[in-house]
Image (tube, rainbow, N blue to C red):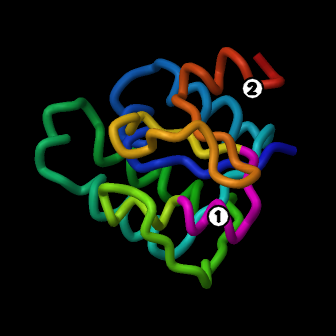
Amino acid sequence: MQRIVIDTNVVVSALIQQSYPHRIIYNLFIGGKIQLCVSGQLMREYYKVLIRPKFSRYPDFFVKAEILLVKIETKALKYNPTIKLDLLKDKDDNMILELADECLVDFIITGNTNDFIFPSYKQTKIVTPQIYWDNFNIYS
């Protein structure tokens, strides 16, 4: 089973529209076809971002976010990365690479192509949701 890390921007997109991020999270992760890996730090970021008032303009956003976060808390594999990296321009995003390194994931899925400017980190491919869905999703 593929192991992935999903950046926060992908989680937000999955809650707003039914496109590639939505398919990855709901069809593949919740459907039990891929394994999501998280850390306490990443979960805190998910919670912090998903309660932002700007998302109130989307129908039922907060209800859907709460339900999704419960699913992630119960279904995802949890890790506590021990290394600290300083490879990305946005220092907060280094936690994604640290988590990927700790749990040896196959993919980091992110919409943040401004900071994740390299195609891979060690054994982990760094891809957008569309590239993952079109090229690496073995269930599509």
Mark 1 to mark 2: distance in Å? Answer: 25 Å
Q: Main secondary structure of the magenta part?
A: helix
Q: Quadrant of residue 80?
A: bottom right
Residue underneath mark 1:
74
Which percent across, then down, holds residue 57? Answer: 14, 33
Position of 139 compared to 125: left or right? right
Other residues around mark 2 within 10 Å, as few (<14) / some (14–19) / many (≥20): some
Q: Quadrant of the C terminus?
A: top right
Q: Is residue 26 left or right of residue 139?
A: left
Q: Is residue 102 above or below residue 117?
A: below
The one of 2 and 32 positioned closer to us in this rendering: 2
Q: Residue at x 48, y 18 (%)?
A: 19
Q: Quadrant of residue 138?
A: top right
Residue at point 45% right, 73% down?
Answer: 41
Q: Quadrant of the N terminus?
A: top right
Q: Which residue is mark 2?
A: 136
Q: Looking at this rendering, what residue extends furthest in the bottom direction? A: 82
- Write down the region rendered in magenta: 97-106
At 59% from the left edge and 80% from the top edge, which residue is drawn? 83
Residue 101 sits inside the magenta stretch:
yes
Q: Secondary structure at mark 1?
A: helix
- Asked whether residue 33 appears in the rendered view, the answer is yes
> Crowding at label 1, few (<14), some or many (≥20) Cα neighbours within 10 Å?
few
Q: Amino acid at mark 2?
A: Phe
